[in-house]
């Protein structure tokens, strides 16, 4: 993500001979600083409000919002780290929050996969999903998702001089991509066989899966390219684009939350269908 090898773009490193730690001097364009402040001011209060609304549903033994709550919590971590990074602290404090933000991004990716998996199981294996869907199992999955990025980030923090750090980051980000494609394809394949799921729920699930895949493709696929292609890392403009896309991740998750609310996708699809019907009627009348 915003890795230590951004030295020629965003960081000027000073290696201390005593502690062998990195102390960055962050310098970013003014427009990126303003954009980050706007993202924080809009996204942070809305994310807190969304978590509060979803928490009341979990108290009513509704398991469905658990993954989206954890996704929004990972966004809160990113927002808090953005506040610290914008303040530009000196020395080790900056490095610590830099990797905490990295941890939040990785956790966000994990919970996006969990949301897609949950929707896929609801369509492809509805009976199994309704029996196995419990708060205890969801809690265990959340613990695993929070632990995996920690296992990755800690060695990354202490292994900063590794030449293969970008490749490891790319692999970590690339693994969810085929899973999201599989979940969408499997859902579309099993869509007509899911009798126990209503038509509105089917449209909502497909819309959520498409949105998750779209968000992941737009925000993280360029980062994978940046990590694997050396020429991309040397491109100043492309590297700045990567930083901007990563900082838009919490807002994209917030959009996903609003689309998961009942009625939002239904109204959108209904309006699209109406537009399509009107265009068909116009073409028929002109013929």
Image (spheres, rainbow, N blue to C red):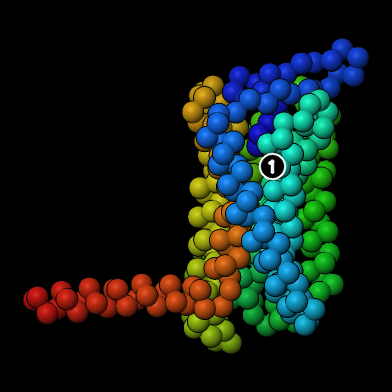
Q: Residue 60: percent from the left, percent from the top?
A: 77, 82
Q: Which image quadrant: the C terminus?
A: bottom left
- Mark 1 sits on what residue? 82
Question: Dot 1: what SS?
Answer: helix
Residue at left offset 83%, top offset 37%: 154
Q: Residue 244: percent from the left, percent from the top?
A: 56, 39
Q: Which residue ends up furthest to the top in the rendered image? A: 17
In the rendered view, tell whether residue 79 sits above or below residue 70: above
Residue at left offset 69%, top offset 42%: 82
Q: Which image quadrant: the N terminus?
A: top right
The image quarter containing residue 27 is top right
The image quarter containing residue 43 is bottom right
Residue at left offset 50%, top offset 55%: 214
Q: Residue 268: percent from the left, percent from the top?
A: 43, 72
Q: Residue 6: percent from the left, percent from the top?
A: 64, 25
Query: In this rendering, does residue 163 appear at all?
Result: no
Query: In this rendering, does residue 173 appear at all?
Result: yes
Q: Nearer the viewer, residue 211 or 36?
A: 36
In screen coordinates, is 195 left or right of 47?
Answer: left
Q: Residues within 10 Å of mark 1 (few under 14, many from 20)?
A: many
Q: Which residue ends up furthest to the left in the rendered image? A: 287
In the rendered view, tell whether residue 142 sits above or below residue 10: below
Total count of labels = 1
In screen coordinates, is 281 left or right of 179?
Answer: left
Q: Nearer the viewer, residue 200 or 236?
A: 236
Residue at left offset 74%, top offset 23%: 24
């Amino acid at each position: 993500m915003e890795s230590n090898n951004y030295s020629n773009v965003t960081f000027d490193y000073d290696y201390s001979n005593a502690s062998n730690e990195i102390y960055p001097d962050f310098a970013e364009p003014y427009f990126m600083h303003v954009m980050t402040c706007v993202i924080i001011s809009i996204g942070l209060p809305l994310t807190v409000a969304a978590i509060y609304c979803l928490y009341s549903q979990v108290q009513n033994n509704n398991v469905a919002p658990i993954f989206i709550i954890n996704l929004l919590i990972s966004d809160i971590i990113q927002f808090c780290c953005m506040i610290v990074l914008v303040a530009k602290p000196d020395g080790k404090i900056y490095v610590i929050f830099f990797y905490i933000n990295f941890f939040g991004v990785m956790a966000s990716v994990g919970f996006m996969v969990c949301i897609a998996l949950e929707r896929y199981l609801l369509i492809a294996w509805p009976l199994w999903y309704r029996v196995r869907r419990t708060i205890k199992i969801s809690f265990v999955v959340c613990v695993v998702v929070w632990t995996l990025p920690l296992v990755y980030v800690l060695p990354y923090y202490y292994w900063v001089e590794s030449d293969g750090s970008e490749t490891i980051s790319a692999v970590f980000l690339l693994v969810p991509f085929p899973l999201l494609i599989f979940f969408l394809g499997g859902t579309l394949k099993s869509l007509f066989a899911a009798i126990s799921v209503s038509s509105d729920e089917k449209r909502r699930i497909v819309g959520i899966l498409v949105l998750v895949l779209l968000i992941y493709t737009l925000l993280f696929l360029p980062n994978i390219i940046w990590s694997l292609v050396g020429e991309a890392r040397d491109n100043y403009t492309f590297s700045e684009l990567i930083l901007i896309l990563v900082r838009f991740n919490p807002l994209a998750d917030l959009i996903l939350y609003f689309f998961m609310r009942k009625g939002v996708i239904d109204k959108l699809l209904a309006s699209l269908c109406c537009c399509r019907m009107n265009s068909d009627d116009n073409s028929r009348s002109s013929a």
